[in-house]
Amino acid sequence: MAVALNPVQIMKSEAEEERSETARLSSFIGAIALGELVRSTLGPRGMDKILVAMGRSEGQIEVTNDGATILRSIGVDNPAAKILVDISKTQDDEVGDGTTSVVVLASELLREAEKLVAMKIHPQTIIAGYRRATDVAREALTKSAQDNSANPEKFREDLLKIAKTTLSSKILAQHKDFFSNLAVDAVLRLKGSGNLDAIQIIKKQGGTLGDSFLDEGFILEKKIGVNQPKRIENAKILIANTPMDTDKIKVFGSKISVESTAKVAELEIAVKEKMKTKVQKILKHDINVFINRQLIYNYPEQLFADAGVMAIEHADFDGIERLALVTGGEITSTFDNPELVKLGKCDLIEECIIGEDRMIRLSGVQLGEACTIVLRGATNQILDEADRSLHDALCVLTQTVKETRTVYGGGCSETLMAKAVMDAAVHVAGKEALAMESFARSLLMIPTIIADNAGYDSAQLVSELRAAYAEGKTTFGLSMDEGIVDCMNQVGITESYQVKRQVMLSASEAAEMILRVDDIIKAAPRKRTADHGPC
């Protein structure tokens, strides 16, 4: 009988399990801690983090306030925290901005849920209330959205305002007028295609951020070969990925035995003839520019120079992929059928100097919307952060060109949704109403944190904001330049409807997923055993 009462071991000895309240508490703590980590970066006055790399890139540092970059760089062991890292990555991939907001809102939803669980309210009841609140908030947000896409001038103004609002919390805030115009010009060149591959960003150390510029064309970070033409008009470009080296025998592990040095000379001549034949096949395509992903050695480079063809070597794969896109050509590896090869074309190829480096500019490319943004800055860290900031702005603008509706920022949309949820909760009987009120309080934490990070009295400002909404002033939000509650339409703080909608839905879904958890099981680690088999 004593043996029968012993607990039965189901899992392996080193496997771990956390159940019910312990598992739920572990999830809440992990998610809330992650929210606390990034909340100080939220808003126009948010602070930056220094990320110090370890391992292979030990000593390298990144200075950023981008939520996705911070969360991607830190090691997270808590399962719930990993879910928040994933939604931040998804937010970055989907719309490009709002990566910090989505994590902060999800952690606040879980903080409120923890209080409700402590009041003995079942997690499924909380989830049902959150779902109702999400529907009400989404409806309120959709009703408040504006669409000026029918008027090109007003739509461009909207895009400029969105770009300025996005860049206000980034390193480019001091130059936001300049970079907003630059980003809007680049996106409007895409003519609604939303293909960001057509916009190339080049980072060049030196100068200041204000020295950055938009070039209407494609700039390749390479040099033109020796004794070759430095300027070609009406270029016909063959883009290739083929070996152009003469001193390598391509059969690995091969050995060649010769009787005398004369035979070595004959072998070299044979290899040169083979390369000469290959170059002649390439020239039969009736081209005047040859761009190769791989190296071009001296002998084939000399042959191209003799034929008056510009040869550019070692254009990295990302470079030739984008090059093929903007010039309308195809990447080629074999040259036996010239009639089947699609050549790239552009009006002019010439050498240009940016900073202290020589580069190649392609003007009048087939893909008219192609352009290059050249970023200048004092250090690599500034350039990297400027690149991330500008990429966020470009992503948001391309999303806005597709989904043209806009909403007001500065905590305006969150307060509007919170008021709508609070009003709806009054008409709900049962415990779900408590969850809806908690959802509204979580939304109001966004303007609270924005005010706190700017050093203002958040309790005063948020109470003034709620009072303004009670009076029907539904365009009011927080203006952090002066630390007051003001009309967002007059101040010009506008955000993309798509970004706000995605933040709210993703945060709600993540909180819902974590709330459902009542058991965390960690598998036993795999043991390493000595391999005594034959080598």
Image: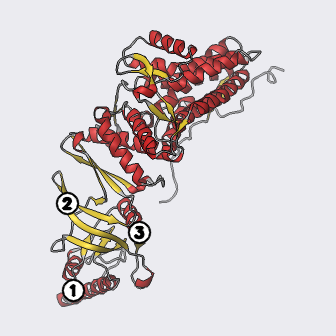
Residue where numbered disc 3 is placed? 328
Q: CA distance from mark 1 to mark 3?
A: 44 Å
Kind of residue sitting beneath label 2: Cys
Residue 323 falls in which quadrant of the image? bottom left
Kind of residue sitting beneath label 1: Val
Secondary structure of the residue carrying numbered label 3: loop
Q: Is residue 454 visible?
A: yes
Figure coloring:
secondary structure
**Residue 301 placement (x, y as % from top left):** 22, 76
Q: Is residue 30 visible?
A: no
Q: Residue at x 18, y 44 (%)?
A: 206
Residue where numbered disc 1 is placed? 264
Report how many numbered discs are placed on residues in the image: 3
Vertically, is 462 above or below 241? above
Task: Between label 1 and label 3, give the one nearer the viewer.
Answer: 3
Vertically, is 518 above or below 391? above
The crowding category of the residue bearing disc 1, from other C-alpha atoms within 10 Å (few below 14, some 14 to 19, many at least 20), is some
**Residue 64 placement (x, y as % from top left):** 35, 33
Q: Residue at x 31, y 33 (%)?
A: 171
Q: CA distance from mark 2 to mark 3?
A: 22 Å
Image check: 339 left or right of 109?
left
Q: Nearer the viewer, residue 344 or 271?
A: 344
Image check: 199 left or right of 510?
left
Residue 258 falls in which quadrant of the image? bottom left
Image check: 306 left or right of 156?
left
Residue where numbered disc 2 is placed? 352
